[in-house]
């Protein structure tokens, strides 16, 4: 098949959607399909002039990325410069032109996102060019409140529901994602649940790194968080839990991995005010190899967002043999139910629960059957398996004529 993947941003942007698209494109290429990624050159929410949920950006600060490249897996990548941002949407004329000029060259187009501009563009181009499209609405369940909630509701009414219903097929990464699509008017028979995955070959041989522990000052225990530094990802709950954890385990290092999306200074301020900054490390965005090293070396992984479609990093922590403390909501509830972990009720005192769960992991020699959980992830949640399932959905969409 000739497959076109379309999304607002792509690697080196750090995020679950970008990781998802990178790996499925790679695995589909390995299966012999011709895969192209169509995206923008933006990698942050504030590198394009306009309005985002971080405020007003006046200057273009786009990175110097190639407009076209073919990666080591044979995946072709086209990047176009966006001209303007308006909250979740980028105005990228070159991407739109490519769609309308070249869509007939592909058998199927798979677009990622929901509130972005790309799904609507694909829906229009697909209808005109008679090329079926598949949609994975990664961000339907959005942690929006206040004015941003109004923006989302407006998006639902003006284009969201129409895009969902016009797709030849919808991919939900978890049951909660599927239920939200149905509530917005999608047909149940449109939707296939295909969870995210992990690159099995990269995780099954991971072991703790003594070198990394030396770099961290040889703490007795390491607590790891991997998420963009944005308020809804919940890093503040971990910081609030640190004093309680240090009372029983004073030689503990708390590592926060992820790019700063506007909340980093506040997290640092909170750590300083609580007197725990010396026990914290904020790494920023790091390489994939370095991230795997942290996953394998940490004693526990914590992710407590106010909303999460899936949470690939939760699977990755377990695949590395690290127990996971997870918010019991959205796609993370799916991980807790299907794989395992320590649930956090986000309607209660989150920091107290985090402290209690982390100390439970430290005390539990079996770590909640982490060996069994790890094998389950490696066996059942590989990107190779995800790609095969997606290829089947694509073939069904093509054969049905969209």
Image (tube, grey):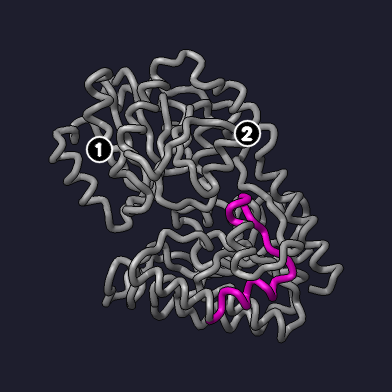
Residue 327: x percent and y percent? 44, 41
Q: Nearer the viewer, mark 1 or mark 2?
A: 1
Quadrant containing the C terminus is: bottom right
Return the residue found at the far top: 365
Please report the residue visible at 45 percent of the width from the left and 75 percent of the height from the top: 90
Rendered image quadrant of residue 347: top left
Return the residue found at the far bottom: 128
Name the side, left or right, on which 55 lies relative to 386.
left
Q: Say the numbered circle drawn on residue 380.
A: none
Give the labeled residue for mark 1: 240
Residue 193: x percent and y percent? 69, 52
Quadrant containing the N terminus is: bottom right
Give the labeled residue for mark 2: 377
Q: SS class of the residue under badge 2? A: helix
Residue 247: x percent and y percent? 22, 21
Say if residue 379 shows up in the picture.
Answer: yes
Please report the residue visible at 13 percent of the width from the left and 40 percent of the height from the top: 273
Name the side, left or right, on which 330 lies relative to 219.
right
Say if residue 37 shows up in the picture.
Answer: no
10 Å neighbourhood of mark 2: few (<14), some, or many (≥20)?
Answer: many
User: What residue span does the magenta drawing correspond to?
Assistant: 158-177
Work out whether residue 192 or residue 392 is closer to the camera in this orientation and state it.
192
Find the distance from the CA under tag 1 to the CA under tag 2.
30 Å
Return the residue found at the far front: 348
10 Å neighbourhood of mark 1: few (<14), some, or many (≥20)?
Answer: many
Work out whether residue 364 or residue 291 is closer to the camera in this orientation and state it.
364
């Amino acid at each position: 098949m000739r497959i076109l993947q379309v999304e607002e941003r792509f690697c080196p942007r750090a995020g679950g959607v970008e990781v998802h698209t990178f790996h499925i494109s790679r695995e589909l290429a390995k299966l012999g399909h011709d895969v192209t990624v169509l995206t923008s050159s933006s990698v942050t929410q504030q590198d394009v002039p306009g309005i985002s949920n971080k405020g007003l950006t006046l200057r273009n600060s786009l990175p110097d990325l190639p407009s076209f490249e073919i990666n080591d897996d044979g995946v072709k990548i086209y990047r176009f410069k966006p001209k303007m941002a308006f909250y979740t949407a980028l105005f990228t004329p070159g991407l739109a032109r490519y769609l309308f000029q070249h869509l007939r060259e592909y058998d199927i187009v798979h677009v990622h996102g929901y509130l972005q501009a790309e799904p609507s563009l694909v829906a229009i181009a697909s209808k005109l060019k008679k090329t079926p499209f598949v949609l994975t609405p990664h961000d339907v369940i959005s942690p929006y409140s206040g004015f941003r909630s109004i923006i989302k509701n407006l998006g639902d009414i003006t284009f969201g529901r129409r895009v969902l219903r016009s797709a030849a097929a919808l991919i939900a990464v978890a049951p909660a994602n599927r239920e939200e699509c149905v509530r917005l008017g999608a047909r149940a028979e449109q939707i296939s649940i295909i969870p995210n995955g992990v690159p099995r070959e990269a995780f099954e041989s991971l072991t703790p790194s003594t070198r990394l522990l030396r770099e961290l000052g040889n703490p007795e225990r390491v607590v790891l968080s991997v998420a963009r530094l944005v308020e809804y990802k919940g890093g503040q709950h971990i910081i609030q839990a640190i004093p309680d954890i240090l009372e029983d385990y004073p030689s503990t290092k708390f590592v926060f991995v992820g790019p700063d999306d506007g909340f980093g200074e506040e997290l640092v301020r909170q750590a300083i005010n609580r007197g725990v900054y010396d026990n914290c490390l904020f790494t920023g965005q790091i390489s994939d190899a370095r991230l795997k090293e942290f996953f394998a070396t940490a004693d526990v992984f914590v992710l407590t967002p106010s909303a999460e479609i899936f949470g690939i990093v939760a699977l990755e922590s377990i695949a590395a043999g690290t127990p996971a403390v997870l918010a019991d909501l959205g796609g993370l509830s799916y991980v807790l139910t299907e794989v395992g972990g320590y649930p956090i009720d986000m309607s209660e005192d989150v920091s107290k629960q985090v402290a209690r769960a982390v100390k439970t992991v430290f005390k539990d020699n079996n770590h909640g059957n982490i060996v069994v959980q790890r094998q389950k992830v490696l066996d059942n949640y590989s990107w190779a398996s995800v790609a095969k399932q997606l290829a089947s959905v694509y073939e069904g969409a093509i054969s049905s004529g969209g």
